[in-house]
Image: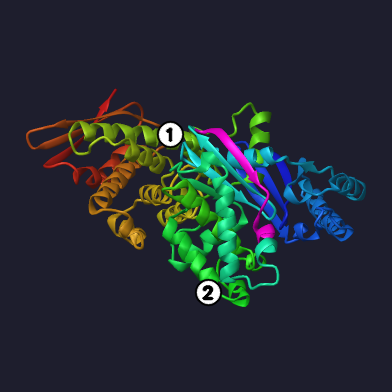
Amino acid sequence: MLLERIGLIDIGSNTIRLVIFEIDEHFTMFQVQNIKTPARLFQYLDKKKMMSQAGIDMLVKVLKSFKAVADQYKVSVLMPVATAAIRQSSNRDDIMKQVRKATGIEMMLLPEEKEAFYGNYAVLHTTQFSSGITIDIGGGSTEVTYYENKELKQYHSFPFGVVTLKQLFFDGKEHNDPKAIKKMQEFVKEQFKSIKWLSKKQVPIVAMGGSARSIANVHQRQINYRLAGVHGYRMYRNDLQRTLDLFQSLSIPQLQNLDGLSRDRSDLIIPANVVFNTLFDEVKAPVFLFSNKGLREGIVMEYLNNKYENKAFSIFNIAAQTVNRLAASYHTLAHVAQHRVKLVDRLYEELCRLGIFEKNPEMEKLLHFGSYLYYLGQFVETGASSQHTFYIISNSDLDGISHKERVSIALLASFKNRSLFNQYLTGYTDWYTVTQVDQLQSLGGIIKFADAINDSHMEVIKNIKIKKTKNGHDLVLYYKGDILAEEYRAERQRKHIERLLSGKLNIIFTES
């Protein structure tokens, strides 16, 4: 059920973008439209920060076009937000007046602190780290925040972005001029050092925005990364240096044809990469992550949380929320998934009690998610449920879940047999130890068996116990109701439990 259709126009210094979100009853934010134009409004500001009439005309032209698109989609709310280029303009009142008169649009001028807040808000509600530094580099400003235990503690807006850095250091020079790059590095380093709370924080850095996504995309292609999406993607200092070295070695025409880098960022990507490298060194960060959610998503998320009494997005149950939303998107029956999780929990507890597994909270979390999403791909095609399930989960941006966890969940949720499991694992074998692979296979088998003993979807199995006998084990399934389907499927899938236990396995159905 559609709750709302929200249009957000992000009027940045480098690009102007319209994103239209459809919000369903689960508060899933579906992007139904995402268009942009590289307006580069910052180039229309003179030395006194006055925007020329040509710049205002460009802005009006783009907003008229975007408003027509939003009207066609019948958005319930249109949010036009303006950042550094308009904020820093000495004639911003005149700009807003002309826009209002020509388009009927009342631009929301974001103060520096609100721009930093919204980017941070998106990161807090979509990533798993409880403390970190965020950075959102735009065309004319760079917002940096520090959060601790999921609470915003510090923020600062630097009056430079990729466009202004290009203007300051590369005017009349090549995009990769070594001396210009060195001077820019020194400038950025000095700027970061002026903010004392950044120094040696030793927390993860989370980067947002188009320049960040471009760097992640390029790096993924350079290393033949198998997963889709940059949300939660991790890079380290040597990785950031690798992309910078690549960008410096290429001409503008070569950058424009570089896979993963959009053409309109080819002359701006080196300043962005330098800023990230410098911040990494200043913070002494352990890792550099990318968020596909930023300012735009933060604005919409806060709007929805305010409107629906903070029920839309949590900062503490991020992974569970995103798993539930993914399941709902593929029409998973919630009561069936929940009962499957319950049965998996009971089997896992019994096997831990017998010493087959050692209790592990992280593995339990993956087991819960894998069993909840089990065979979600059957919505696409029943005959290839396993294959579709693995593909969908492994290639979906899952908030609050790392890329390795995403693959683990995909392996569990798609488990059919060992052959397919090993086929899916190809390309990720260096992510896991042999012990971890064996454990994931075993847990996948438990999920498959649990699904089998709820074959009727009537929740007839109420409890499970495993009892050791002289010759092996009794698997006692306590039931209430008709168990014809469950009896048949349990026998067919018994091998998944039998493999874990020595001796003979007897499956006993006992009426409760």
The image's colour scheme reads: rainbow
Judged by depth in the image, the label closer to the viewer, 1 or 2, is 2
Element type at mark 2: helix
Count neighbours of disc 1 (C-alpha within 10 A) and say few if under 14, some if 14 to 19, many if 20 or more.
some
Image mark for residue 269:
none
Quadrant of the drawing holding the N terminus: top right
Image mark for residue 338:
1
Where in the figure is residue 366, as x and y percent of width and height?
Answer: 37, 42
Mark 1 and mark 2 in contact? Answer it, CB < 8 Å.
Answer: no
Q: What residue sits 39% from the left and 31% below the top?
A: 459
Q: Is 152 within the magenta?
A: yes
Residue 110 relative to residue 27: left or right: right
Where in the figure is residue 408, as x and y percent of width and height?
Answer: 37, 49
Q: What residue sits 48% from the left and 32% below the top?
A: 149
**Which range of residues does the magenta coloring cover?**
150-165
Q: What residue sits 19% from the left and 43% below the top?
A: 500
Q: Nearer the viewer, residue 190 or 107?
A: 190
Which comes sooner in the sequence, label 1 or label 2? 2
Q: Which residue is mark 2?
A: 249
Residue type (three-letter) at the residue carrying disc 2: Ser
Where in the figure is residue 448, as x and y percent of width and height?
Answer: 33, 45
Where in the figure is residue 401, as x and y percent of width and height?
Answer: 45, 44
Residue type (three-letter) at the residue carrying disc 1: Gln
How far, Cα to Cα, is label 1 from label 2? 53 Å
